[in-house]
Structure formats: structure tokens, C-alpha cells
Image: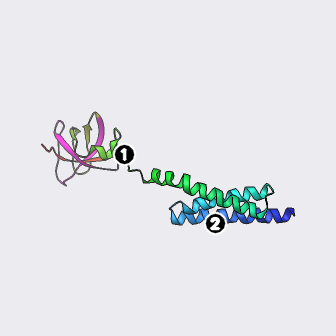
Amino acid sequence: MRTLVAVSALIWLLLAAALVGGELLLGDLSLLMLGGGALAAAGATTAGAPTWAAAVVFAAVTALLLIAVRPALRRRMAAPDRAAELEGGTRALAGRTGVVVEDVDGLSGLVRVDGSLWSARALVVGAAFGPGDRVTVVHVDGNTAVVDQEVH
């Protein structure tokens, strides 16, 4: 009897692992919830529940996860990226005006934007800006502000 319980629990665990692995390919959280139900059924089987009770545990836990947990997780995952709203976010720099601290050319330079120093390079090859010149940040490439003449 012990062997049957162990085999049954192992089958539920393998099913849970397969479902979670399938979730990695699918990515919509459905298989993950089914995997949670299978894991609960494996626990019920290990605790000595008969096969029919493990199946009921599987169905109940899966339904609970699908109804209560999955929608909340999907909302959380679908939340818009708010990085631009954070102070100092690189996307928030685009369009801001800065002052050249060290000569800026197509390869290197240094500008001060909103009180922070940024490595910089000119947008247009051949363009150059000297200390004190006002420039506009066009975009940020890695940790380098790509700048052009100030836009009024």
C-alpha cells in the first residue's frame, strides 16, 4: 500500500513539473495554476488521501488558483512600464535641456541635466559643443545622453 501511495504522489509531482515546464513555453499562467493543483494533489496523496480525494483536491485548488490568483497576476504583469515617471529615469531625460560641462563631440563629452552629470555624445557626427553651451537630450543610449542643439 505504501508503494502505491508513493507512486501516486510521484505521478502527481511529475504532472506538476510538466505543467510548470509547459507554462514556461506558454506564458499565460493557466498551466502554472494547474501545476499548483497537481502539487496540492501530490500533498494530499502523500498525506494518505485516496485517489478520488486527491482528484477533488486537484480540481478545487486549480479552480481557486484560476479564479483568485491568475487574474491578479495577469493584471500585475500587464501593468504599464512606469520607468519614465520615476525621478532620474533615462526615458524622462529625452527632451530636457542640459549644459555642456566638458566638450561634447560625436564620441564623448559631459553634460549636466537637471543637476546630474551624464556622459554625452553629439547626435550629428561632426557636431561639437563647448562648455556652457545649452543642448537638448534627444535620447539616452545606455548611460550616454545623445544631445543636439538646444530646442527653443
Q: Mark 1 highlights which residue?
A: 83
Instruction: Say above or below: 69 vs 3.
Output: above
- Residue at (21, 52) in percent of width and height: 123
Q: Secondary structure at mark 1?
A: helix
Camera-side residue: 102 or 5? Answer: 5
For the residue carrying disc 1, how many other residues have a C-alpha within 10 Å: few (<14), some (14-19), or many (20+)?
few
Q: Amino acid at mark 1?
A: Ala
Residue 55 in sight here: yes
Choose the circle earlier in sequence order: 2 or 1. 2
Question: Where 37 sits versus 93, above or below?
Answer: below
Span colored in magenta: 116-142
For disc 2, the neighbor class at 10 Å (few under 14, some 14 to 19, many from 20) is some
Front position among marks 2 and 1 = 2
Based on the picture, tell me whether residue 79 belongs to the magenta stretch. Answer: no
Q: Please give the residue where the numbered disc 2 appears in the rendered image.
A: 18
User: Which quadrant of the figure contains the C terminus?
Assistant: top left
Q: Is residue 40 above or below residue 103?
A: below
Which coloring applies here? rainbow
Q: Position of residue 99 (x, y in %)?
A: 20, 37
In terms of secondary structure, where does tag 2 sit? helix
Q: Residue at x 35, y 40 (%)?
A: 86
Of 51 and 35, the residue lying toward us: 51
